Amino acid sequence: MQSAGLLYCTDSCAAVRRRKMEPHRLFYLLLLCVGEILAKPTFRKERIRLDPDLNAQVHEENQSFQMDHEAFLGKDEAKTFDQLTPEESKDRLGKIVDRIDSDSNGLISTEELTAWIKRVQKRYVYENVARVWKDYDVNKDNHISWEEYKQATYGYYLANPEEFQDAAEQFSFKKMLPRDERRFKQADINGDLEANREEFTAFLHPEEFEHMKDIVILETLEDIDKNGDGLVDEDEYIEDMFSHEEGTPEPDWVATEREQFSDIRDLNKDGVMDKDEIRHWILPQDYDHAQAEARHLIYESDASKDKMLTKDEILQNWNMFVGSQATNYGEDLTRNHDEL
């Protein structure tokens, strides 16, 4: 999730953040992005962090391969990896395994795999910022001001408001602009409205920074809270993940989610989730995503059941590993050794 103003956008919306675009193309991509927040999805979607219960459920629903693919390699990299032959994949994966084995004892522990996945995740975040930096740092002073970002992202809309008379269009821009500004100011630690690299990274990836967690919670609440009462009830919670067509039965996982809401999400049993309960849901304090991914990979590949992995065990399950964060979802298989 790399967009700035809207945290849960797809690649179409992320493209808006990555580079300047022709005005009309920018406009339609922005609407696409907002549509993902305002429209009712027909499929299940997840928020930033999966807690252990949801993580297990997702794997049970046969979605584990894609999650692993993105955990080990990275989303963009996974697309490149998919073009390799199995032989090429195994050869390159073997070289990555040597890097993961930090003590060179021929065994990959949970701690080593967790550390590697966190390294991959961090590198992905900073590489993403590096890719878009030059597009927003217009005056090349190695800072991105709020004005630079605002003009690059919303300049055409601000200069040509007469072209955006549709109510939905106006709502989209009116919602996104102040939301971006609020997040930018939260990321701007010294309050000078000039973001350095670290501050801009916090702006684009708030879920990675402790001082941005309140913004993540607030944006989640705003996205789900359709009646504007500052709380999330069960129907709003389900609607965020699933659009029910009249006359059709709900999938089994929806019934499970309703139980999750009442039994786990609604901690004080008052029928709604407040900000603290939303925080517990999407940013659980006792849950380490990288560690959970590492444990999952080891559990699925550990033929000897010694809770460690040999290179052979990993290569025997190469499909799972090149589809995970440990190889940045396949991307690292296309890199030179020195780039890792």
Image: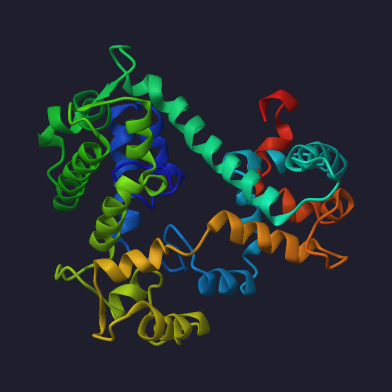
Q: Residue 280 location, x and y as percent?
A: 36, 68
Instruction: Specify the quadrant of the image occupied by residue 64.
Output: bottom right
Q: What residue is at 23 percent from the left and 60 percent from the top?
A: 222
Q: Is residue 92 left or right of residue 227?
A: right
Q: Is residue 144 above or below residue 238?
A: above
Q: Residue 271 location, x and y as percent?
A: 25, 84
Q: Is residue 185 left or right of residue 131?
A: left
Question: Which one is nearer the viewer's eye here, 81 or 314?
Answer: 314
Q: Is residue 269 above or below residue 288?
A: below
Image quadrant holding the C terminus, namely top right
Q: Is residue 130 left or right of residue 147?
A: right
Q: Is residue 201 visible?
A: yes
Q: Residue furthest top?
A: 140
Number of labelled discs?
0
Q: Residue 39 location, x and y as percent?
A: 31, 62
Q: Is residue 6 visible?
A: no
Q: What residue is at 71 percent from the left and 40 percent from the top?
A: 81
Q: What residue is at 30 percent from the left and 59 percent from the top?
A: 220
Question: Which one is nearer the viewer's eye here, 288 or 232?
Answer: 288
Q: Is residue 149 left or right of residue 14?
A: left
Q: Residue 314 location, x and y as percent?
A: 82, 53
Q: How is the image coloured?
A: rainbow
